[in-house]
Amino acid sequence: MNGSFLLENRNDGVYLQVKKADNGGVMPGFEELMYYMDKKKVPYGSVVELKRAFEHAENGTAVKICDTPVTPFDGWCEYDVASDSMSASVIMYPAFAGRREVSLQEIQGDLNSLKIKSGVDGQLLQTMIFERRFFEKMVFATGSPAKEGYDAEIIYHFNTKVDLTPKLNEDGSVDFHQLDLINSVAPGDVVATIKPEYPGEEGRDIKGTPLRPKKVARKVFRFGRDLRVSSDGLRLIAEKKGHIILQSDDKIILSGEYEITSDVNTATGDIDFDGDVRVRGVVRAGFKVHATGDIRIDGVVEGAEIVAGGNIVLQRGIQGMNKGSLTAGGNIVTNFIENATVKAGQNIETDAILHSKVAARGSITVQGKNGYLIGGDVRAGSIITAKIIGSEMGTNTVVSVGSNPEIIAKIDELKKEMMKTAKDKEQLNQVVSMLRKKSEAEGKLAPDKQAMLQKSMMTVIQLDSNLKEIRSKLDEITKYNVDDKLARVKVLGSIYPGVKIEIGDVKYFIREKNDFCQYIKTAGEITRVNM
């Protein structure tokens, strides 16, 4: 296939013949001829003379290149092994006329000497010999490099980087309230997973030396309480609801309480957490703290909105600025309440209530160092207790206990609605019963009667659903109603003119200062009795 040179001894010297390449094979040039002859020490006079002989021999004629015959030689191969032993190439050279060409067995012997034992392309070597591909450098052996692995990686399924960049609204204003700093999780949530390490695959150079990939790092979870690792070791799972964080030492912590060590302000945004919340600082005006559990706040609550599914405990109090509010599903305990709206699902305990709207389903207790209840509208389901109610200045103050007239009206409304729905259902049941009897007697109803039956049955089902909903509402609102006989206002110090007492639907105005007394409802009237 490839072109080549043929050297031949004749009586008068050595002759050169150039064989042309076939089918686009490699054709050696003059430089290859010089190397070939120098390698076997074949004399040729000067370079100029050899080149002239080469050019004549290219025409297919045998050209004499020296006068003295030489020792004939066999064909041979030369090998080039890469310094990293990852590849090797070969060039095959033709034999002197009449001598033996290179065989596959000879090449195998050469490879053994070179210690080449891996990645050899035997088919390529056979083709090289069969097709006489002289003077062509061919890569016949390649190593397989090691396939590098990679380290294990922990993938966190929560925000691990606090971004204090506020949200930009469409109108160009900046929203400092929604900063998304809380990572809430529920029981069973996967908070992190491990992408296992891949050790890689061993390679081998052409001499058979193993090539090992670099060592890779494993990963294990570092975590605190209320978290568990799955059986395969690849998932970290929350066992309770709470707030998940990543500490600086890559330890994952789950806390049932979300703690803010600073003030709640533009740096934190609003807080909305499914669990308990602890604020070490102040809650600034205009911000919100919502929690499904308890809320504890060490600093003052300014004109802010605090909503807890459980209890609210304020170490200091709330300065509402006529816009702040506290709403708790449970109890509220605070040092003072000033110019705020406060609602508790159970009881309220405080040292002072000043010019605020306060309501509790249970009792309200205002006592301690001050025990002031001055101004505003304060309502409790059962008992209001305070040292001082009203002031010497005659400040308008309303204290209400017992059944709420609005609740009583709502109960009456629901009862009437329930009676009407039950009556409608009874009438429709009669229609359904009549039509079914008619169908049984006649075997089939007229189309209009059949449509009436179906419509009536669907309406009965809907009315039954409505009745269940009304009963549920009635049961819920009845919880808020109390027996006025148990309701009372207790004065542990003094109560002043300007105070209006309401027990149920009965009102009573304080006309003169009274000390150490309580007000109860008897025989439809509010009366004062001594403590």
Image (spheres, rainbow, N blue to C red):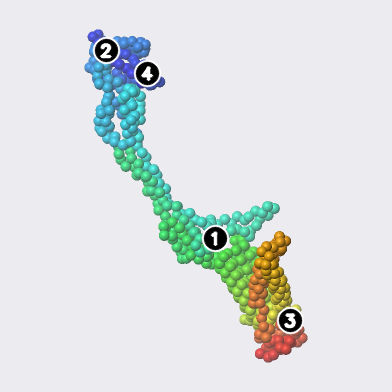
Q: From this viewpoint, is residue 79 visible? A: yes
Q: Sequence order check: which comes first, mark 4 or mark 1?
A: 4
**Relative to 114, is 29 above or below?**
above
The answer for how far apart the CA atoms under marks 1 and 3 are is 48 Å
Mark 4 / mark 2, whichever is N-terminal: 2
**Discs 4/1, front:** 4
- Give the amino acid at mark 1: Asn
Q: How many marks?
A: 4
Q: Secondary structure at mark 2?
A: strand
What's the residue type where badge 2 is placed?
Answer: Val
Q: Nearer the viewer, mark 3 or mark 2?
A: 3
Farthest top residue in view: 12
Can you identify the residue that label 2 sits on?
A: 14
Q: Quadrant of residue 411?
A: bottom right
Give the amino acid type for the residue marked by disc 3 in the picture.
Answer: Asp
Which secondary structure lies at badge 1?
Answer: loop
Q: Quadrant of residue 442?
A: bottom right
Q: Which mark is residue 505?
A: 3
Left or right relative to 179: residue 497: right
Q: CA gap, disc 3 to disc 4?
A: 120 Å
Q: Residue at x 38, y 21 (%)?
A: 25
- Whether tag 4 and tag 1 are in contact, CB under 8 A, the answer is no
How crowded pointer 4 is (Cα within 10 Å; few <14, some 14-19, many 20+) is rated as: some
Dot 2 surroundings within 10 Å: few (below 14), some, or many (20 or more)?
A: many
Viewport quadrant of the N terminus: top left
